[in-house]
Image (cartoon, rainbow, N blue to C red):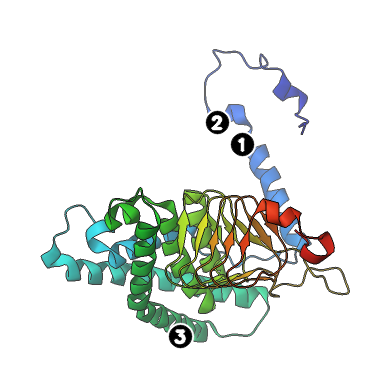
Amino acid sequence: MSVNHPSELLNIHATPINAPLNSANWELDKIVQELRNARNDWRAQRGRSREPGLRELPSRDALQQIIRELCGALFPMRLGPQELREETEDYYVGHTLDAALNELLRQVQLELIYFARQHNTDADEAALKVQANQIIRLFAAALPGLRRTLDVDIQAAFQGDPAARSVDEVLLCYPGVLAIIHHRLAHTLYQLGVPLLARIVAELAHSLTGIDIHPGAEIGSGFFIDHGTGVVIGETAVIGERVRIYQAVTLGAKTFPTDDKGHLQKGLPRHPIVEDEVVIYAGATVLGRITIGKGSVIGGNVWLTRSVPPGSSITQASSRHQAPQEADV
């Protein structure tokens, strides 16, 4: 894609090399004004000409710190501070959770107030803060169960990879485990009604691992992503117990229904259901609201858009032998 630059930018000798380096050379007043004009145009187009004055959106940086602290509280002797001793473990967990949950409360409040303003509702900010408190109470209460589920995920990764020498190695090193920790935290937030925070947490994991799991996806325990880079799991995917998938697997949507005005209909079930004990090998693409039956094996690079019964073994060769109208793969 070509970019049209102002002519003065193309003349690299326009400013003498020995010119003093100060902000006057950057024409900052002009640039600041033009950026203000761009912001105002964007806000006017969306009916948002009046901003509340303070930043009203949750902070990605704050959530990154919150997730780091929650990981430490969940696995203190492995993801906590280097100097931590077992006899002070409970103190560390309590102190860290208190800090993380209080900051998370602030971020939840920001999201609730933001969406209330966006939808022009008359919700009282005091009532929204009470709602935020309840969300954090429920989130905190879910953490022990979440830890137990993650223990099963970590054990599945250890058992599923012959290269793994210990569960500690799996927790410390495997991107699939990092992604599922983020996902289980994000999914809990998603279920509690703060989808923006949940999506930010999911995208933090995506940035770190290359694994893209929408926080709405429902994933059973004992889930293992081996290697992981390029995995995509859509919002309405449902994954059962003890499922294993490999790098570059997509559980995506086949079509995107629209309403009578041509707008995408959001939230409809459009991603696969993967039943218990399924294995999906590298590069497979599974699309649409189809069901992969219990115990099935989906081979590498298979393109699948039909349901398969329990115990199926689908390879590229078997896919090619299916009639297109029957298999659609």
Query: Which residue does the numbered mark 2 point to in the structure image?
Result: 23
Q: Left or right: where does residue 23 sit relative to residue 261?
A: left
Q: Which mark is residue 28?
A: 1
Q: Which mark is residue 146?
A: none
Q: Left or right: where does residue 267 sit relative to residue 93?
A: right
As measured in the structure, the alpha-carbon distance from the residue carrying label 2 to the one carrying label 1 is 7 Å
Tag 1 secondary structure: helix
Tag 3 secondary structure: helix
- Along the line of sight, the residue nearer the viewer: 96 or 301: 301
Cβ atoms under marks 3 and 1 closer than 8 Å: no
Quick check: 255 above or below 16?
Answer: below
- Along the line of sight, the residue nearer the viewer: 95 or 210: 210
**Of marks 3 and 1, the one in the foreground:** 3
How many other residues sit within 10 Å of disc 2, few (<14), some (14-19) or many (≥20)?
A: few
- Res 181 → quadrant: bottom left
Name the residue located 41 percent from the left edge and 70 percent from the top edge. Answer: 104
- Res 329 → quadrant: bottom right
Name the residue located 56 percent from the left edge and 50 percent from the top edge. Answer: 282
Q: Position of residue 267 (x, y in %)?
A: 68, 74
Q: Position of residue 102 (x, y in %)?
A: 36, 72
Query: Which residue does the numbered mark 3 point to in the structure image?
Result: 130
Q: Looking at numbered disc 2 in the image, what kind of residue is underneath it? A: Ser
Quick check: 16 above or below 60?
Answer: above
Residue 165 appears in view:
yes
Q: Position of residue 101 (x, y in %)?
A: 36, 72
